Amino acid sequence: MSDYIVHSGWWCDESQRHIGAKYNDSDNRIRTPKFFDVWYDCVTRFASPRRVFIADSASPLKPDLTGKSIEWVSLAQNFQHGMICVGKFGGWTRAFALGAMYAYLNDAEYSVFLEQDCLIVGDGIIERAIENMSRAEISYGGTSVVRIEQSFVIIKRDYILRFLNDFLGMKASDRDVFTEVKFQRIQKREYALSFAGLNNSRFIPLPFGFGRNRPIDFAERCFYAQQWSRAELEALNQRLNLPSLSSLLSV
């Protein structure tokens, strides 16, 4: 069985808003502490991580961790979304890098990042993605030919330091260049090297959808998605019958 650590970031306040939300019909419940219960239940039901690590951006509202096996670390402040971030890096970059290094320093074979609004569905979904990687070293949401998705990212231990060095070492801040674009620049460079025969391709898309793509096919064996609408959450609950999701929808 693959050895991996699942990690994520956390930010929540009373507004239930997120500047990076794409869909106007995404339900505000996904930006509340109770949604974390659903996120955690999906992780523990469909995956077998050695540990779960959360980098909290000094949020005023935090989930109830009672009964959950969580390594919770809080940053000194909210560094905000990349487009308006404080300093060079926004909250996504800081949470992603901190969790990946946590996995690396615990000698996990893989770091698995799942954004706080990203739910995974399907038995062994992470193991399936790892098996699909073969000789590649990083797997990501490749549901669009023109867009990288970073809500679900798996990195082999041996590639974590190099990837973080390349990503954090870019001169541009997250305000100046979207994190997805930074990710894509590294991907394109690695592809160019592989085409030149200088190394094997390090990047491979996840073997399933849907990420931010719509519609979601709830009959699929394995999938992941974020920025959920109310109707999508109800459809998901029909498939999973999760008490935490039923509780969220009752609010």
Image (cartoon, helix red, strand yellow):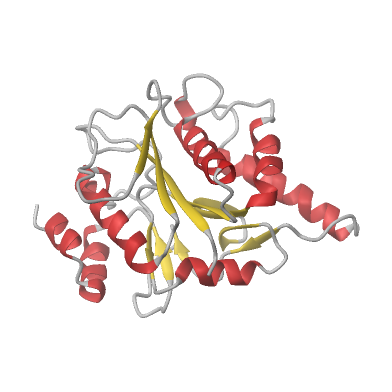
Q: Residue 83, position in %: x, y?
A: 48, 30
In which quadrant of the rendered view does residue 132 lie? bottom right
In which quadrant of the rendered view does residue 222 lie? bottom left
Q: Residue 107, position in %: x, y?
A: 59, 49
Furthest-left residue in view?
250
Furthest-front residue in view?
106
Q: Residue 48, position in %: x, y?
A: 42, 64
**Along the horizontal axis of the image, is 36 left or right of 86?**
left
Q: Which residue shows up at 77% across the image and 60% down it?
A: 201
Could you tell me if residue 215 is visible in this image?
Answer: no
Q: Residue 46, position in %: x, y?
A: 37, 68
Of residues 34 and 249, the one drawn nearer to the viewer in this rendering: 34
Q: Which residue shows up at 40% across the image and 78% down it?
A: 220
Of residues 183 and 200, the one drawn nearer to the viewer in this rendering: 200
How many marks overall?
Answer: 0
Could you tell me if residue 169 is visible in this image?
Answer: yes
Instruction: State whether residue 74 is above or below residue 185.
Output: above
Instruction: State whether residue 201 is above or below residue 61.
Output: below
**Along the horizontal axis of the image, is 243 left or right of 121?**
left
Q: Which residue shows up at 74% across the image and 50% down it?
A: 188
Instruction: State whether residue 1 is above or below residue 63.
Output: below
Instruction: State whether residue 61 is above or below residue 134.
Output: above
